Image (spheres, rainbow, N blue to C red):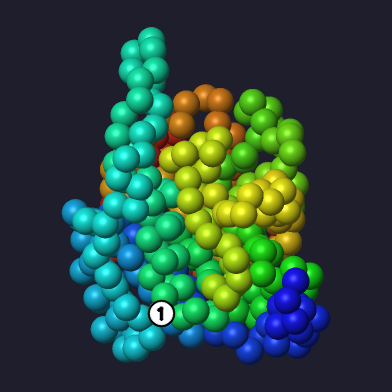
Amino acid sequence: MNEEKQQITASWNEIGRKFPLVCGLKTFDCELTIYACLQQAYKQFDYIVITDDGSTDGTIDMIQKCVNDFQIKNISVLDVSKWDPFPDQKIEKRIDDHHVMRPAGQTHAKAQWKNYEVVKKNFPNAIYVSLEDDVILYDNVRSRIYNRIVNWKEPFTDSEFFNVTTMIDKETTLEVAHNYEEGVPIPGMRFRRLHDNAGDYTLAAWWCGGEITVGPDPNYPFGACLFPWLPKNQMGKKGQCDDLPFGFHCVNFRSNKIGTDYGEKVIIKKFDELNDSDIDVTLLDRVHFPKEIYVDDNRIIQWKE
Protein backbone atom coordinates (compact mmCIF):
# COMPACT_ATOMS: atom_id res chain seq x y z
CA MET A 1 0.00 0.00 0.00
CA ASN A 2 1.46 3.36 -1.01
CA GLU A 3 1.80 6.24 1.42
CA GLU A 4 -1.28 8.14 0.22
CA LYS A 5 -3.50 5.08 0.55
CA GLN A 6 -2.10 4.42 4.00
CA GLN A 7 -2.91 7.97 5.10
CA ILE A 8 -6.47 7.82 3.73
CA THR A 9 -7.08 4.43 5.32
CA ALA A 10 -5.67 5.53 8.69
CA SER A 11 -7.80 8.70 8.78
CA TRP A 12 -10.94 7.32 7.12
CA ASN A 13 -13.05 7.54 10.27
CA GLU A 14 -12.38 11.28 10.28
CA ILE A 15 -12.50 12.10 6.55
CA GLY A 16 -15.23 9.69 5.42
CA ARG A 17 -18.00 12.15 6.29
CA LYS A 18 -16.37 14.89 4.19
CA PHE A 19 -17.10 13.12 0.91
CA PRO A 20 -20.50 13.93 -0.66
CA LEU A 21 -23.22 11.30 -0.87
CA VAL A 22 -24.20 10.91 -4.53
CA CYS A 23 -27.20 8.74 -5.30
CA GLY A 24 -27.11 6.61 -8.43
CA LEU A 25 -30.70 5.82 -9.38
CA LYS A 26 -31.43 3.35 -12.19
CA THR A 27 -34.90 3.61 -13.73
CA PHE A 28 -36.99 1.52 -16.09
CA ASP A 29 -40.81 1.57 -16.36
CA CYS A 30 -41.30 2.60 -12.73
CA GLU A 31 -44.05 5.21 -13.07
CA LEU A 32 -45.88 3.93 -9.96
CA THR A 33 -42.94 4.34 -7.56
CA ILE A 34 -40.41 6.85 -8.93
CA TYR A 35 -42.23 9.94 -7.61
CA ALA A 36 -42.30 8.58 -4.03
CA CYS A 37 -38.72 7.36 -4.40
CA LEU A 38 -37.47 10.81 -5.45
CA GLN A 39 -39.72 12.58 -2.94
CA GLN A 40 -37.67 11.00 -0.17
CA ALA A 41 -34.29 10.66 -1.88
CA TYR A 42 -33.66 14.26 -2.93
CA LYS A 43 -33.54 15.35 0.74
CA GLN A 44 -30.93 12.74 1.65
CA PHE A 45 -28.21 13.17 -0.98
CA ASP A 46 -25.93 15.90 -2.26
CA TYR A 47 -26.74 14.94 -5.85
CA ILE A 48 -28.87 12.39 -7.71
CA VAL A 49 -27.91 10.88 -11.06
CA ILE A 50 -30.75 9.07 -12.81
CA THR A 51 -29.89 6.78 -15.72
CA ASP A 52 -33.01 5.60 -17.56
CA ASP A 53 -32.85 2.46 -19.69
CA GLY A 54 -35.57 3.39 -22.17
CA SER A 55 -38.75 3.57 -20.09
CA THR A 56 -41.90 3.31 -22.21
CA ASP A 57 -44.45 4.23 -19.52
CA GLY A 58 -44.84 7.50 -17.62
CA THR A 59 -41.56 7.26 -15.70
CA ILE A 60 -39.94 10.38 -17.19
CA ASP A 61 -43.14 12.40 -16.74
CA MET A 62 -43.32 11.41 -13.07
CA ILE A 63 -39.66 12.35 -12.57
CA GLN A 64 -40.33 15.77 -14.10
CA LYS A 65 -43.46 16.24 -11.98
CA CYS A 66 -41.55 15.50 -8.77
CA VAL A 67 -38.69 17.82 -9.82
CA ASN A 68 -41.20 20.61 -10.47
CA ASP A 69 -43.31 19.99 -7.36
CA PHE A 70 -40.32 20.11 -5.00
CA GLN A 71 -38.07 22.41 -7.06
CA ILE A 72 -35.32 19.80 -7.02
CA LYS A 73 -32.03 21.24 -8.27
CA ASN A 74 -29.52 18.53 -7.35
CA ILE A 75 -30.47 16.06 -10.10
CA SER A 76 -29.55 14.92 -13.61
CA VAL A 77 -31.51 12.54 -15.85
CA LEU A 78 -29.77 10.67 -18.69
CA ASP A 79 -31.13 8.26 -21.30
CA VAL A 80 -28.62 5.39 -21.45
CA SER A 81 -30.81 2.94 -23.37
CA LYS A 82 -28.53 2.92 -26.44
CA TRP A 83 -25.41 2.26 -24.37
CA ASP A 84 -24.45 -1.42 -24.07
CA PRO A 85 -21.29 -1.93 -22.02
CA PHE A 86 -21.22 -5.69 -22.67
CA PRO A 87 -22.59 -6.11 -26.22
CA ASP A 88 -21.26 -9.65 -26.64
CA GLN A 89 -22.59 -10.96 -23.36
CA LYS A 90 -24.84 -14.02 -23.55
CA ILE A 91 -26.96 -15.47 -20.77
CA GLU A 92 -28.29 -18.99 -20.39
CA LYS A 93 -32.08 -19.08 -20.53
CA ARG A 94 -34.52 -21.95 -20.16
CA ILE A 95 -36.69 -22.59 -23.22
CA ASP A 96 -39.27 -25.32 -22.66
CA ASP A 97 -37.28 -28.33 -21.40
CA HIS A 98 -33.77 -27.21 -22.34
CA HIS A 99 -31.34 -24.32 -21.84
CA VAL A 100 -30.00 -22.06 -24.58
CA MET A 101 -27.57 -19.15 -24.68
CA ARG A 102 -29.22 -15.89 -25.74
CA PRO A 103 -27.96 -12.29 -26.09
CA ALA A 104 -28.16 -10.65 -22.70
CA GLY A 105 -30.17 -7.56 -23.70
CA GLN A 106 -31.05 -5.40 -20.71
CA THR A 107 -29.68 -6.71 -17.42
CA HIS A 108 -29.29 -5.45 -13.89
CA ALA A 109 -25.52 -5.74 -14.28
CA LYS A 110 -25.50 -3.46 -17.32
CA ALA A 111 -27.81 -0.92 -15.66
CA GLN A 112 -25.66 -0.84 -12.53
CA TRP A 113 -22.43 -0.52 -14.54
CA LYS A 114 -23.75 2.39 -16.60
CA ASN A 115 -25.04 4.29 -13.60
CA TYR A 116 -21.86 3.87 -11.60
CA GLU A 117 -19.64 4.86 -14.53
CA VAL A 118 -21.56 8.13 -14.97
CA VAL A 119 -21.39 8.95 -11.26
CA LYS A 120 -17.71 8.04 -10.89
CA LYS A 121 -16.72 10.15 -13.92
CA ASN A 122 -18.50 13.23 -12.60
CA PHE A 123 -18.02 12.73 -8.84
CA PRO A 124 -14.69 10.86 -8.54
CA ASN A 125 -14.43 11.15 -4.75
CA ALA A 126 -18.09 10.77 -3.78
CA ILE A 127 -19.64 8.05 -1.68
CA TYR A 128 -21.70 6.28 -4.32
CA VAL A 129 -25.13 5.17 -3.09
CA SER A 130 -26.90 2.70 -5.35
CA LEU A 131 -30.68 3.07 -5.12
CA GLU A 132 -33.40 1.12 -6.93
CA ASP A 133 -36.36 2.99 -8.43
CA ASP A 134 -38.89 1.27 -6.16
CA VAL A 135 -37.27 2.03 -2.77
CA ILE A 136 -38.86 4.60 -0.44
CA LEU A 137 -36.35 5.88 2.12
CA TYR A 138 -36.91 7.08 5.66
CA ASP A 139 -35.96 10.65 6.57
CA ASN A 140 -32.88 9.71 8.64
CA VAL A 141 -31.00 7.74 6.00
CA ARG A 142 -28.21 10.25 5.29
CA SER A 143 -26.73 10.20 8.79
CA ARG A 144 -27.16 6.43 9.10
CA ILE A 145 -25.25 5.79 5.85
CA TYR A 146 -22.37 7.96 7.05
CA ASN A 147 -22.40 6.18 10.41
CA ARG A 148 -21.79 2.90 8.62
CA ILE A 149 -19.22 3.94 6.03
CA VAL A 150 -16.92 5.78 8.45
CA ASN A 151 -16.24 2.45 10.13
CA TRP A 152 -14.66 0.97 7.01
CA LYS A 153 -11.21 -0.46 7.73
CA GLU A 154 -10.37 -0.84 4.02
CA PRO A 155 -12.20 2.03 2.29
CA PHE A 156 -10.61 1.35 -1.10
CA THR A 157 -12.45 -1.98 -1.33
CA ASP A 158 -15.18 -1.84 1.33
CA SER A 159 -18.91 -1.55 0.64
CA GLU A 160 -22.22 -1.57 2.48
CA PHE A 161 -25.59 -3.17 1.72
CA PHE A 162 -28.52 -1.76 3.68
CA ASN A 163 -31.69 -3.37 4.99
CA VAL A 164 -35.12 -2.33 3.68
CA THR A 165 -38.58 -3.70 4.45
CA THR A 166 -40.37 -5.64 1.71
CA MET A 167 -43.70 -4.11 0.68
CA ILE A 168 -46.33 -5.52 -1.68
CA ASP A 169 -48.88 -2.78 -1.07
CA LYS A 170 -49.32 -0.11 1.60
CA GLU A 171 -50.78 -2.65 4.03
CA THR A 172 -49.02 -5.86 3.06
CA THR A 173 -45.59 -7.48 3.18
CA LEU A 174 -44.25 -10.93 2.42
CA GLU A 175 -41.90 -13.16 4.35
CA VAL A 176 -38.69 -14.16 2.59
CA ALA A 177 -38.64 -17.70 3.96
CA HIS A 178 -36.59 -20.71 2.92
CA ASN A 179 -38.72 -23.10 0.83
CA TYR A 180 -41.78 -21.09 1.94
CA GLU A 181 -41.42 -22.42 5.49
CA GLU A 182 -42.72 -19.72 7.82
CA GLY A 183 -40.05 -18.38 10.16
CA VAL A 184 -37.19 -20.25 8.43
CA PRO A 185 -34.50 -17.89 7.05
CA ILE A 186 -32.61 -18.50 3.83
CA PRO A 187 -29.36 -20.31 4.71
CA GLY A 188 -26.34 -18.03 4.72
CA MET A 189 -28.36 -14.82 5.14
CA ARG A 190 -28.78 -12.78 8.31
CA PHE A 191 -32.15 -11.06 8.75
CA ARG A 192 -33.51 -8.63 11.31
CA ARG A 193 -36.98 -9.98 10.48
CA LEU A 194 -38.00 -12.16 7.54
CA HIS A 195 -40.17 -9.43 5.98
CA ASP A 196 -36.96 -7.47 5.37
CA ASN A 197 -34.62 -7.45 2.39
CA ALA A 198 -31.39 -8.01 4.28
CA GLY A 199 -29.15 -6.02 1.94
CA ASP A 200 -28.76 -5.85 -1.84
CA TYR A 201 -28.27 -3.28 -4.60
CA THR A 202 -31.69 -1.96 -3.65
CA LEU A 203 -29.62 0.26 -1.34
CA ALA A 204 -25.83 -0.06 -1.26
CA ALA A 205 -22.75 2.16 -1.00
CA TRP A 206 -19.04 2.27 -1.84
CA TRP A 207 -16.42 4.94 -2.52
CA CYS A 208 -15.87 6.26 -6.05
CA GLY A 209 -12.28 7.09 -5.12
CA GLY A 210 -11.52 3.48 -4.32
CA GLU A 211 -10.76 0.41 -6.41
CA ILE A 212 -14.24 -1.06 -6.78
CA THR A 213 -15.68 -1.66 -10.24
CA VAL A 214 -18.99 -3.20 -11.33
CA GLY A 215 -19.61 -6.11 -13.68
CA PRO A 216 -21.78 -9.19 -14.25
CA ASP A 217 -21.85 -11.67 -11.39
CA PRO A 218 -19.85 -14.75 -12.49
CA ASN A 219 -22.45 -17.02 -10.88
CA TYR A 220 -25.50 -15.07 -12.05
CA PRO A 221 -24.50 -12.86 -15.02
CA PHE A 222 -27.88 -11.10 -15.22
CA GLY A 223 -27.09 -9.52 -11.84
CA ALA A 224 -24.36 -7.10 -10.84
CA CYS A 225 -21.27 -7.90 -8.81
CA LEU A 226 -18.51 -5.82 -7.25
CA PHE A 227 -14.89 -6.33 -8.28
CA PRO A 228 -12.28 -7.10 -7.12
CA TRP A 229 -14.30 -10.15 -6.06
CA LEU A 230 -13.90 -10.26 -2.30
CA PRO A 231 -15.87 -12.38 0.17
CA LYS A 232 -16.45 -9.35 2.40
CA ASN A 233 -18.43 -7.64 -0.40
CA GLN A 234 -20.38 -10.72 -1.37
CA MET A 235 -21.93 -12.84 1.38
CA GLY A 236 -19.71 -11.11 3.92
CA LYS A 237 -22.04 -8.08 3.80
CA LYS A 238 -24.53 -8.63 0.99
CA GLY A 239 -27.60 -10.29 2.45
CA GLN A 240 -26.28 -9.82 5.97
CA CYS A 241 -27.78 -6.51 7.15
CA ASP A 242 -29.85 -6.96 10.30
CA ASP A 243 -29.81 -3.23 11.03
CA LEU A 244 -33.08 -1.33 11.47
CA PRO A 245 -34.77 -0.77 8.09
CA PHE A 246 -33.71 2.18 5.93
CA GLY A 247 -37.04 2.29 4.12
CA PHE A 248 -39.38 0.15 2.01
CA HIS A 249 -38.76 -1.90 -1.12
CA CYS A 250 -41.95 -1.88 -3.20
CA VAL A 251 -41.58 -5.29 -4.85
CA ASN A 252 -43.98 -5.93 -7.75
CA PHE A 253 -45.40 -2.39 -7.42
CA ARG A 254 -45.50 -2.00 -11.22
CA SER A 255 -48.16 -1.79 -13.89
CA ASN A 256 -46.97 -4.98 -15.59
CA LYS A 257 -47.49 -6.96 -12.37
CA ILE A 258 -51.28 -6.56 -12.40
CA GLY A 259 -52.75 -10.04 -12.35
CA THR A 260 -49.73 -11.61 -10.67
CA ASP A 261 -50.87 -14.55 -8.55
CA TYR A 262 -48.87 -15.15 -5.38
CA GLY A 263 -50.33 -18.62 -5.06
CA GLU A 264 -50.73 -20.49 -1.81
CA LYS A 265 -47.10 -20.94 -0.82
CA VAL A 266 -45.89 -17.33 -0.53
CA ILE A 267 -46.20 -16.09 3.05
CA ILE A 268 -48.14 -12.82 2.91
CA LYS A 269 -48.80 -10.78 6.04
CA LYS A 270 -50.38 -7.47 6.97
CA PHE A 271 -48.07 -4.90 8.53
CA ASP A 272 -50.43 -4.44 11.48
CA GLU A 273 -50.07 -8.16 12.28
CA LEU A 274 -46.28 -8.03 12.65
CA ASN A 275 -45.86 -6.28 15.99
CA ASP A 276 -42.80 -4.55 14.52
CA SER A 277 -42.35 -1.07 16.00
CA ASP A 278 -39.24 -0.45 13.85
CA ILE A 279 -41.39 -0.13 10.72
CA ASP A 280 -43.07 3.24 10.13
CA VAL A 281 -45.90 2.48 7.72
CA THR A 282 -47.14 6.08 8.00
CA LEU A 283 -44.35 6.99 5.56
CA LEU A 284 -46.31 5.22 2.83
CA ASP A 285 -49.21 7.64 3.37
CA ARG A 286 -46.92 10.68 3.30
CA VAL A 287 -45.52 10.00 -0.16
CA HIS A 288 -47.34 10.14 -3.47
CA PHE A 289 -48.24 7.17 -5.66
CA PRO A 290 -50.07 8.12 -8.90
CA LYS A 291 -51.96 4.82 -8.79
CA GLU A 292 -51.97 2.06 -6.20
CA ILE A 293 -52.10 -1.69 -6.31
CA TYR A 294 -53.26 -4.17 -3.70
CA VAL A 295 -53.37 -7.92 -3.13
CA ASP A 296 -56.95 -9.19 -3.18
CA ASP A 297 -58.42 -12.04 -1.15
CA ASN A 298 -57.34 -14.49 -3.87
CA ARG A 299 -53.72 -13.29 -3.50
CA ILE A 300 -53.72 -11.61 -6.91
CA ILE A 301 -52.35 -8.10 -7.57
CA GLN A 302 -55.09 -5.69 -8.63
CA TRP A 303 -55.48 -1.98 -9.24
CA LYS A 304 -56.82 -0.12 -6.22
CA GLU A 305 -59.86 1.97 -7.10
Q: Nearer the viewer, residue 16 or 73?
A: 16
Q: Nearer the viewer, residue 233 or 131?
A: 233
From this view, report whether residue 41 is shown above or below residue 132: below
**Residue at 60% over, 58% down:** 164
**Image x and y of residue 115, in percent:** 40, 64
Q: Mark 1 highlights which residue?
A: 122
Binning the other alpha carbons within 10 Å of mark 1 as few (below 14), some (14 to 19) or many (20 upward) gives: few
Could you tell me if residue 289 is visible in this image?
no
From this view, report whether residue 262 is shown above or below residue 29: above
Q: Nearer the viewer, residue 156 or 277?
A: 156
From this view, report whether residue 128 is shown above or below residue 230: below
**Image x and y of residue 43, in percent:** 48, 83
- Please identify the quarter of the rendering in which residue 57 is found: bottom left
Q: Amino acid at mark 1?
A: Asn
- Please identify the quarter of the rendering in which residue 125 is found: bottom right
Side of 71 relative to 150 (left or right):
left
**Residue at 65% over, 74% down:** 145
**Residue at 59% over, 85% down:** 19
